């Protein structure tokens, strides 16, 4: 018996085809994962079931929920189905809740909008369902506002809203992509448990094959709006037919070939660095509080070394990075670059600043959209006393673009003309152009699709060979850090709890927190 | 919440102190001596000096400032140089026209802006939206005194529904008073309402694109329910900012509109006092207006906290 049956669904937005002939089924109690890269149409498939589509969308085919064709329903009929028969959980828990309403009111609204019960009964049910998703009343009363909860807790509230009326089908669109690895494991367990206990069907959209492999009964692989392969999870992983599926799998487990690091010679030395913030005074005449985001961190980055820094959000990774770049003052300790302190009277010496460059996470937000590529990548030139001009400048630009796999002709284009992966190449070119001694990669591949990510990681490994890069690679993604670093540090609550050679830390972690992180990270099955 | 209110209150007091200093000293440096102005061109220097002493103008500035401020705090605004009557009395009489006029205009402006902005946002890109946006564009572009003259031409001269100017007086009853304030209030409210409608529309459209509106729709709310239950209150935050700013525009706007409609309000009083170098009146009225604006902004700050729980838990 099938609960949801999508049959030959095609969809176009303002004449532009998005989905072509998509068919899939979900049975009660079954977890079906739809996977693929961005633009594959996996989220659009989910939104078609909810009928939450942008204006100007045309659909054909059938979406049957227990025999009712959702595409043939009027808007009021669809509203009656949403939330009652089909619940949905979204990707971004930080923005998925209304900031000005209490969590109780938002959960109870699911009951009230469907006139399923009285306001009192809805409150009681909201308490029950919040407790069920792990937010018991004694610690999380209904009167809490979303901003008083963490990302994982907010995602639990969204799940509570979605399951409050015991829908037959739950759709989860990248439910854990924005969460830390330990929180992700908890949320995935919760979803599995809810499906097992209530017999709901779960249609899960995710780009992460490792998540899929631990969760789904069946997998649907999509590429460019079409289903290219589908089958039971274990069987599909064992016997991948379509080249795209094989490519996805290979990219997810991609290992880069790092050249051997040169013998150790200290380049950047961090000694007992403390970064503390003043917190607001509890009352107007009280002393302000103090919060230490970085608590006495020490490490040494050797010349030619590729060092990783992992930890969950809020652990102090980004604060430490900004302090290293001299973008933030430190309240204690020393940062030495080639034996010299980088801060002289609170500011960074330009002669040192030019020897460190940064590659940011977001390839979309970290470029000025009104500048051409040549201007974007030559921005670090202002750090130089003798920045190249004229033909020398042009030659430097050409070299930098070629080094990251782009064309010299790309120099006159604007950033919107490039894909996410190309933009990240431009970001690397911008960092490389003044030949810094150290590059800091701050979550530099986290926003990219697996296949693009694999190519960027290859590029970084290549550049290590050509330029002998020294870098600090900051990421929450353990598998990425494992493949591109020689040594790794694990950070928790402002402290480095473990550091050592990458392979050793990953295969035999000594600190319990490292073990927790590694255990929580979803892994792909070993395939012979 | 208590901390937030306390902080806002502290900033209100500081703003008032700074504003009073600024008003007093700016007016002090304006050329033109009130005493010689009052006595005319041919006055003897010793007569002028005597009058200056009489008015207290020979005192050091800082002492005059302090006595002005302490007087104001106890309700004594001093005596008008030209009319020789207590300023407090003159201001009080005129407040009864200007304050109702500004509030009337504010109410009309909200009455125009909310339905128009919500309607346009709900029908974004459709003909209704285009029409409302066209109309508000006109409202923003045309100055309020031109509206005033236009309203007089249509409703006073042609249709004879209203008087072209003057104030009937509250002693003739509430309706008669409001009746004479209606055209001026409309003239004041139209441009402000048009601006506010545009702000309301764009704020709502922004909020309607937020993830939590999609979450609400996924729970089964219709587009309309999602707008009223989730989007509207979030959109109020930017709208409140503009409402707070508009109050000061409305009060300043009365200076011109009261001239056009010949209303004996504060605006006319400022206008006349400036021409007559009646500095004590100018200072007092401006201080009063500043006080009103600062208090209203304080109320807007409190309204923010009422709308947005995130502010309540912060400083």
Image (cartoon, coloured by chain):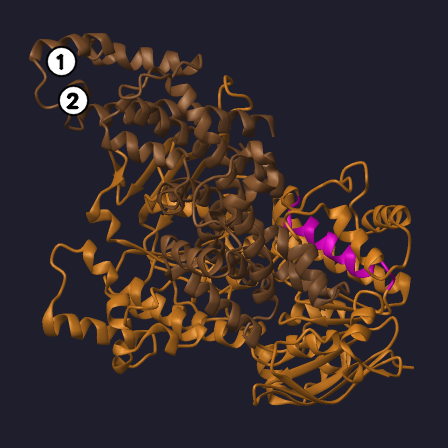
Asked if the residue at tag 1 contacts the one at tag 2, i.e. Cβ–Cβ closer than 8 Å, the answer is yes
Marks 2 and 1 on same chain: yes
Residue at 57 percent of width and 66 percent of height: B120
Most common SS among magenta residues = helix
Q: Which color was chain A given?
A: orange
Q: Residue B48 bears which disc, if any?
A: 1
* Image position, residue A93 (x, y; %): 64, 56
Q: Is residue A418 above or below residue A511?
A: below
Question: Which residues lie in the magenta part?
Answer: A149-166
Within 10 Å of disc 2 (Cα), the crowding (few <14, some 14-19, many 20+) is: some
| Nearer to me, B203 or A298 | B203
Residue at 50 percent of width and 25 percent of height: B9
* Image position, residue A303 (x, y; %): 32, 54
Distance in Å between CA atoms under marks 2 and 1: 10 Å
The quadrant of the image that shows the N terminus of chain A is bottom right
Residue receiving disc 2:
B33
Residue at 66 percent of width and 64 percent of height: B214
- Chain shown in brown: B
* Image position, residue B2 (x, y; %): 60, 26
Q: Residue A183 bears which disc, if any?
A: none
Q: Is residue A214 above or below residue A64?
A: above
């Amino acid at each position: 018996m099938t609960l949801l049956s999508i049959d030959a669904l095609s969809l176009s937005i303002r004449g532009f085809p998005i989905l072509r002939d998509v068919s899939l089924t979900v049975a009660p109690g079954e977890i079906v994962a739809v996977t693929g890269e961005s633009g594959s149409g996996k989220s659009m498939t989910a939104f078609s079931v909810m009928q939450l589509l942008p204006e100007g969308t045309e659909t054909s085919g059938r979406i049957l929920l227990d025999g009712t064709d959702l595409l043939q329903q009027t808007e009021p009929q669809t509203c009656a189905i949403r939330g009652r028969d089909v619940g949905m959980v979204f990707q971004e828990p930080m923005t998925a809740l209304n900031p000005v309403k209490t969590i109780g009111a938002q959960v109870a609204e699911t009951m009230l909008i469907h006139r399923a019960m009285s306001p009192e009964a809805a409150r009681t049910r909201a308490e029950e369902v919040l407790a069920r998703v792990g937010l018991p009343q004694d610690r999380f009363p209904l009167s809490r506002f979303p901003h008083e909860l963490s990302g994982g807790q907010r995602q639990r509230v969204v799940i509570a809203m979605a399951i409050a009326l015991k829908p037959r089908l739950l759709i989860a669109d990248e439910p854990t992509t924005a969460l830390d690895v330990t929180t992700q494991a908890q949320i995935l367990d919760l979803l599995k448990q809810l499906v097992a206990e209530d017999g709901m069907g779960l249609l899960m959209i995710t780009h992460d094959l490792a998540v899929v492999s631990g969760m789904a009964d069946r997998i649907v692989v999509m590429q460019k709006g079409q289903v290219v392969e589908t089958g039971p999870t274990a069987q599909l992983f064992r016997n991948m037919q379509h080249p795209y599926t094989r490519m996805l799998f290979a990219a997810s487990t991609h290992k880069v070939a790092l050249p051997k690091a040169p013998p150790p010679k200290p380049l950047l030395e961090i000694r007992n660095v403390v970064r503390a913030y003043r917190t607001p005074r509890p009352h107007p005449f009280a002393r302000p509080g103090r919060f230490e985001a970085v608590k006495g961190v020490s490490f040494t980055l050797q010349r030619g070394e590729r060092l990783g820094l992992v930890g969950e959000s809020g652990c102090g990774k980004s604060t430490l990075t900004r302090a290293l770049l001299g973008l933030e003052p430190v309240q204690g300790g020393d940062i030495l670059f080639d034996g010299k302190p980088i801060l002289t009277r609170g500011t960074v010496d330009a002669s040192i600043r030019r020897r460190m460059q940064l590659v940011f996470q977001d390839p979309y937000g970290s470029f000025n959209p009104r500048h051409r590529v040549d201007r974007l990548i030559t921005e670090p030139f202002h750090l130089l006393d003798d920045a190249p001009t004229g033909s020398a400048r042009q030659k430097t630009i050409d070299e930098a673009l070629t080094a990251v796999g782009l064309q010299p002709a790309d120099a006159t284009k604007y950033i919107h003309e490039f894909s996410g992966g190309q933009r990240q190449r431009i970001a690397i070119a911008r960092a490389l152009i003044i030949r810094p001694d150290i590059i800091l990669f701050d979550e530099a591949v986290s926003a990219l699709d697996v296949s693009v990510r694999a190519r960027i990681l290859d590029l970084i490994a290549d550049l290590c060979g050509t330029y002998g890069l020294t870098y600090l690679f900051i990421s929450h993604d353990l598998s990425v850090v494992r493949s591109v670093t020689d040594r790794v540090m694990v950070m928790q609550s402002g402290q480095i709890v473990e550091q050592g050679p990458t392979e050793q830390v990953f295969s035999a972690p000594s600190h319990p927190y490292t073990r927790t992180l590694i255990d929580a990270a979803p892994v792909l099955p070993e395939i012979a | 919440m208590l901390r937030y209110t306390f902080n806002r209150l502290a900033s209100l007091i500081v703003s008032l102190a700074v504003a009073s200093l600024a008003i007093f000293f700016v007016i002090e440096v304006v050329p033109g001596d009130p005493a010689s102005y009052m006595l005319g061109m041919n006055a003897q220097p010793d007569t002028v000096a005597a009058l200056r002493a009489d008015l207290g103008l020979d005192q050091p500035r800082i002492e005059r400032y302090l006595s002005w401020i302490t007087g104001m705090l106890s309700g004594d605004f001093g005596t008008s140089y030209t009319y020789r009557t207590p300023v407090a009395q003159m201001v009080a009489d005129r407040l009864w026209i200007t304050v109702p006029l500004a509030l009337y205009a504010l109410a009309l402006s909200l009455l125009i802006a909310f339905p128009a902005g919500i309607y346009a946002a709900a029908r974004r890109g459709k003909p209704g939206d285009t029409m409302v946006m066209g109309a508000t564009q006109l409202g923003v572009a045309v100055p309020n005194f031109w509206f005033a003259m236009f309203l007089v031409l249509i409703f006073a001269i042609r249709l004879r529904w209203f008087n072209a100017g003057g104030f009937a007086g509250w002693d003739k009853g509430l309706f008669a008073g409001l009746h004479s304030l209606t055209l001026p209030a409309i003239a004041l409210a139209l441009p402000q309402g048009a601006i506010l409608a545009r702000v309301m529309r764009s704020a709502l459209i922004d909020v309607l694109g937020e993830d939590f509106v999609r979450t609400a729709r996924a729970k089964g709310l219709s587009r309309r329910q999602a707008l009223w239950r989730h989007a509207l209150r979030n959109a109020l935050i930017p709208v409140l900012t503009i409402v707070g700013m508009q109050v000061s525009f409305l009060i300043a706007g009365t200076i011109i509109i009261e001239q056009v409609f010949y209303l004996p309000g504060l605006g006319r009083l400022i206008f006349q006092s400036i021409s007559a170098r009646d500095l004590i009146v100018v200072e007092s009225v401006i201080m009063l207006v500043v006080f009103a604006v600062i208090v209203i902004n304080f109320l807007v700050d409190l309204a923010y906290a009422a709308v947005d729980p995130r502010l309540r838990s912060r400083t």
